[in-house]
Image: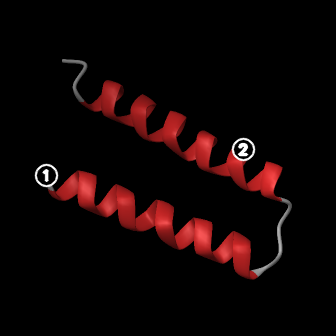
Amino acid sequence: MWGSLVGVLIMAVVNNALVHFSVNPLLNEVVIGCLIVLAVTLDCLRHRG
């Protein structure tokens, strides 16, 4: 449960930072997508065995 909460907070902070610095919305989506892929990859590696 705590991992999910931390993940949501990190994504919210990154999203707000990108909006604050006027980053292109398309790039904003790409960055958030990369963060999700990274999180899933790390979770799979952690539970691998």
Q: Residue furthest front?
A: 25
Locate residue 21 relative to residue 9 in the image: left or right: right
Q: Residue 3 location, x and y as percent?
A: 23, 53
Distance between the alpha carbons at the discs numbered 2 and 1: 26 Å
Give how far across and how far down residue 49 sits, in percent: 18, 18
Q: Amino acid at mark 2?
A: Val
On the image, the x and y values in percent for residue 7 come to 36, 56
- Classify residue 26 as left or right of residue 12: right
Asked if marks 2 and 1 touch (Cβ < 8 Å), the reply is no
Element under label 2? helix
- Disc 2 designates what residue? 30
Task: Pick whichever, 48 or 18, lies toward us.
Answer: 18
Disc on the earlier residue, 2 or 1: 1
Residue name at image x 27 percent, y 32 percent: 46
Residue 26 badge: none
Work out whether residue 9 or residue 39 is closer to the camera in this orientation and state it.
9
Element marked by disc 1: loop
Residue 20 to residue 15: above or below: below
Please name the residue that numbered disc 1 is placed on: 1
